[in-house]
Image (tube, helix red, strand yellow):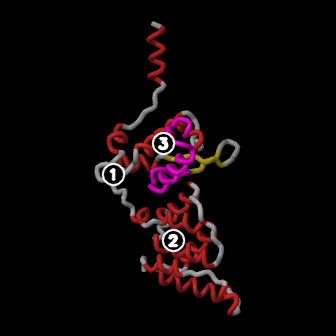
């Protein structure tokens, strides 16, 4: 009798996985690796660890921690995963992965998946990584998603704000966020309006440059090229 009871204990300790996820993950454009990473995050969460590191996840996967980091970034870009914060009893903020976006897509649009978000297809994330010269962190990816989803900034204006940060040699997310907030306050809605705001700001901030200084100025033709696509 004790033998069978021990097996029952094992069964009782199982994790619940929605059948719809296993049946429809391909409709959500998830790879098998992405699916398993999501399931591992779900398992860690049920065990009390809401924010497992790539190294902890990779211990239970057949991919490296570097590959796991890449998968996490992709899942956040695809809006299958977000990073949230909560406050513990000592009023210390803790981060955790939320699977709520995944469940929402799974249970509300599983019959008609709408995963081809324009903002994701606009290649915003590769553009930011190109300009920053490194992969974006999960927090930076989440910041871009907040601009797109919660603040309803258009992909074109986000690109324009990135361009302004490059031109001002202030390539950081706080500066880009300030630009977007200022444009929103002023009612800037198009790339052309954003360019005009940028020109006015730089004319008011920049001293007169000598011809020698002008020669050292960075070639910005590339940024005009990728902005032209959105105008």
In the visual, does 33 lie left or right of 44? left
Q: How many marks?
A: 3
Quadrant of the snapshot with the C terminus: bottom left
Q: CA distance from mark 2 to mark 1?
A: 27 Å
| The N terminus: image quadrant | top left
User: Can you name the residue that lies furthest to the top here?
Assistant: 1
Q: Position of residue 221 (x, y in %)?
A: 53, 81
Crowdedness near tag 1: few (<14), some (14–19) or many (≥20) residues, C-alpha within 10 Å: few
Residue assigned mark 3: 37
Residue pictured at 32% horizontal, 41% vertical: 23
Residue pointed to by mark 2: 158
> In this rendering, which labeled residue sits more in front, label 2 or label 1?
2
Q: Which type of secondary structure does the marked residue at label 3 adopt?
A: helix
In the rendered image, residue 215 lying in the magenta stretch gets the answer no
The span from disc 1 to disc 3 (Cα, nearest Å) is 21 Å
Task: Using the rendered view, name the quadrant where residue 47 is placed.
Answer: top right
Q: CA distance from mark 3 to mark 2?
A: 29 Å
Residue 174 falls in image quadrant = bottom right
Query: In the image, is residue 163 above or below residue 126?
Result: below
Compared across the picture, whether 101 is left or right of 179 comes to: left
Q: Residues within 10 Å of mark 3 (few under 14, many from 20)?
A: many
Instruction: Specify start and end residues of the magenta stretch as a single range.
Output: 58-83
């Amino acid at each position: 009798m004790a033998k069978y009871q021990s097996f029952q204990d094992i069964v009782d300790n199982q994790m619940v996985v929605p059948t719809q996820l296993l049946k429809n993950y391909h409709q959500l454009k998830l790879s098998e690796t992405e699916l398993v990473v999501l399931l591992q995050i779900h398992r860690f969460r049920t065990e009390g660890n809401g924010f497992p590191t790539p190294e902890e996840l990779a211990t239970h996967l057949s991919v490296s921690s570097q590959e796991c980091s890449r998968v996490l970034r992709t899942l956040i870009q695809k809006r299958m995963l977000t990073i949230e914060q909560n406050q513990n009893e000592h009023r210390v903020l803790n981060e955790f992965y939320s699977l709520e976006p995944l469940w929402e897509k799974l249970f509300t649009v599983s019959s008609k998946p709408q995963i081809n978000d324009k903002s994701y297809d606009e290649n915003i994330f590769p553009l930011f990584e190109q300009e920053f010269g490194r992969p974006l962190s999960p927090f930076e990816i989440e910041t871009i998603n907040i601009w797109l989803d919660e603040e309803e900034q258009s992909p074109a204006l986000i690109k324009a704000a990135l361009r302004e940060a490059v031109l001002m040699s202030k390539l950081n997310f706080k500066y880009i966020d300030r630009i977007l907030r200022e444009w929103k306050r002023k009612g800037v809605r198009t790339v052309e309006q954003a360019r005009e705001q940028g020109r006015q700001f730089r004319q008011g901030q920049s001293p007169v440059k000598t011809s020698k200084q002008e020669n050292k100025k960075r070639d910005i033709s590339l940024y005009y090229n990728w902005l032209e696509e959105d105008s």
